[in-house]
Structures are given as C-alpha cells and as structure tokens.
Amino acid sequence: MAKIDDIVKAIDNKLLETGKEHLILQQASKLLLSLGIIESTKELKQILERGEIPHAYKTNTSPRQWLLPLSEERRSRKTTPNNKKKSKSSKKTRLFKKVNLQKDFQ
C-alpha cells in the first residue's frame, strides 16, 4: 500500500507542477521509473488493471488509454485555496468598477 501512496503522490506532484489535468499511462510510467518507484513500465499497468488506484480510469473511445488525474485528496486541497483567492479578487474588481463609475458621474 505504501507503494501505491508513493505512486499517487508522485503523479499528483507532477500534475500540480505542470498544471495538467492528467497523465497518460506512458507519461506516468516514465516518471515513476525515473524516480525509482517502479521497476518496469508493465508494473504500473498491472496496478491500474487491478484497480489499486481508484481515481485512474480507462477511456471509452478509441484509442483506449489509461488516464491518471489528480487524486481526490489533492483535488480537494487544490480547489479550496483557489476559491478563496477568486472571491477576494472578484471583490477587488467590483470595488474598482464602483470607483470608476463614481468618477464618471462626478
């Protein structure tokens, strides 16, 4: 189970670093091999086929491929801070518009 956690953390870190929504199996295997988390490219595919990474999924359309998105844990952490930032920036925008409108009427 610790190996699965290491895989998920490594993929999440890469996704957050690059800003991508997901990695395909080949990209994830290459990353995990370079980090020494897995020993062969087939190892990750076998883990995915056993369903050990629940948020990973296989596309329905051709070409069918495995996609590894951000884990649920990291996704919830990612959305919480961004929501706070958006609300602050939208308040600033509203205040800026209000000030400009007042200047137009003076």
Image (cartoon, grey):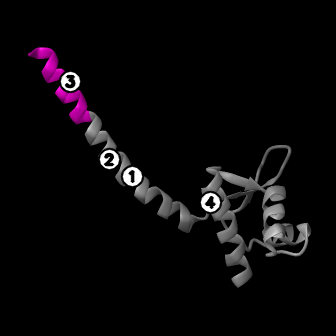
In the image shown, does 35 or 3 lie closer to the viewer? 35
The residue that appears at 70% across and 84% down in the rendered structure is 2
Q: What residue type is labelled 4?
A: Leu
Q: Which amino acid does label 1 sit on?
A: Asn
Check whether the beta carbons of the residues at disc 2 and disc 3 lie within 8 A of each other.
no
The residue that appears at 62% across and 56% down in the rendered structure is 17
Check whether the beta carbons of the residues at disc 4 and disc 2 lie within 8 A of each other.
no
In the image shown, does 86 or 55 lie closer to the viewer? 86
- Furthest toward the top, the residue is 105
- 10 Å crowding of disc 1: few (<14), some (14-19), many (20+): few
In the image shown, does 5 or 54 lie closer to the viewer? 5
The label on residue 100 is 3
Of tags 2 and 3, the one toward the viewer is 3
Query: In the rendered image of this protein, does residue 32 appear above or below residue 97?
Result: below
Magenta residues span 94-106
Residue 34 position within the rendered picture, expressed as x and y whole percent measured from the top left: 82, 67
Q: Which amino acid does label 3 sit on?
A: Asn
Residue 49, visible in the rendered structure: yes
Image quarter of residue 51: bottom right
- 10 Å crowding of disc 4: few (<14), some (14-19), many (20+): many
